Image (cartoon, coloured by chain):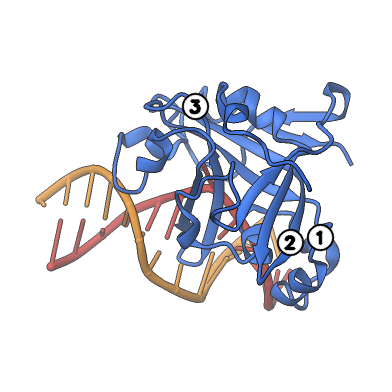
Chain colours: A blue, B red, C orange
Amino acid sequence: MPEILPSSFFDRDVLTLARQLLGMRLVRLVDGRRVGGPIVETEAYRGQEDLACHARHGRTRRTAVMYGPGGRAYVYFTYGMHWMLNCVASPEGFPAAVLLRAIQPTEGLELIAQQRAGRSVQEWCNGPAKLTQALAIDGGFNGVDLSTRDGNLWIEWGEAATEENLVVGPRVGIGGVPEPWLSIPWRFRTRL
DNA sequence: AGCACGATTAACT
DNA sequence: GTTAATCGTGCTC
């Protein structure tokens, strides 16, 4: 039986968590079938002072999950059509989360192919909205505890990325937020 | 009540 | 490289 990450795994700073989630396996259960694969790209969003973070305006109905305990899913809707999946970091009361930007699809490929019909394998899960579409994740998963199987979505131990195989850079798609937030290297990716 | 914009993607020229 | 799609969220009036 594959081992799920314990809730204690998320009890660390969001920057550390964003690095350590690389290589861990995201698993979605659809009609009893496993769908997903190892996480290969993440971004960290940290606190109200981070002007690229949704919690910059404080606690609202939308951002409430980010203030909760680590290991919960923060799923939000944007651009009128896309769902994004985040993993909330500890400590409770401090708003921080890791955006899951890409995974390497290894399980449930039939369903993924169906969800991403017409696109090449390379384009199946190489973007934050692509992976939620591939794994059939939407707003109904907001608040799910990723350290249990209760929500049909969880994260398992995998082969952690080493420092040598880690690429670090600025976050993407955050528009014109002022420095230092625009250029701060809080995006993490495993080298091909 | 109204408005500008968004942690993006895909389909264009 | 450029741009439409499309609507919830949070701010301003």
- According to the picture, the residue beneath numbered tag 1 turns out to be A107
- According to the picture, the residue beneath numbered tag 3 turns out to be A90
Tell me the kind of residue under disc 3. Answer: Ser
- Per the rendering, the mark at residue A178 is none
Mark 1 element type: loop
- Give the quadrant of residue A111: bottom right
What distance separates the C-alpha of mark 1 from that of mark 2?
A: 5 Å
Mark 3 element type: loop
Please tell me if label 3 and label 1 are on a single chain.
yes
- Per the rendering, the mark at residue A35 is 2
Q: Are marks 1 and 2 in contact (CB under 8 Å)?
A: yes
Residue A178, x across and y down, in percent? 46, 29
The chain letter under disc 2 is A
The chain letter under disc 3 is A
For the point 50% across and 57% down, which residue is it? A141
What distance separates the C-alpha of mark 2 from that of mark 3?
A: 27 Å
Counting residues from the start of the chain, the first of labels 1 and 2 encountered is 2
Q: Could you tell me if residue A186 is visible in this image?
A: no
For the point 52% across and 31% down, which residue is it? A89
Counting residues from the start of the chain, the first of labels 3 and 1 encountered is 3
Residue A144, x across and y down, in percent? 49, 50
Whether A172 is drawn above or below A151: the answer is above
Tell me the kind of residue under disc 1. Answer: Glu
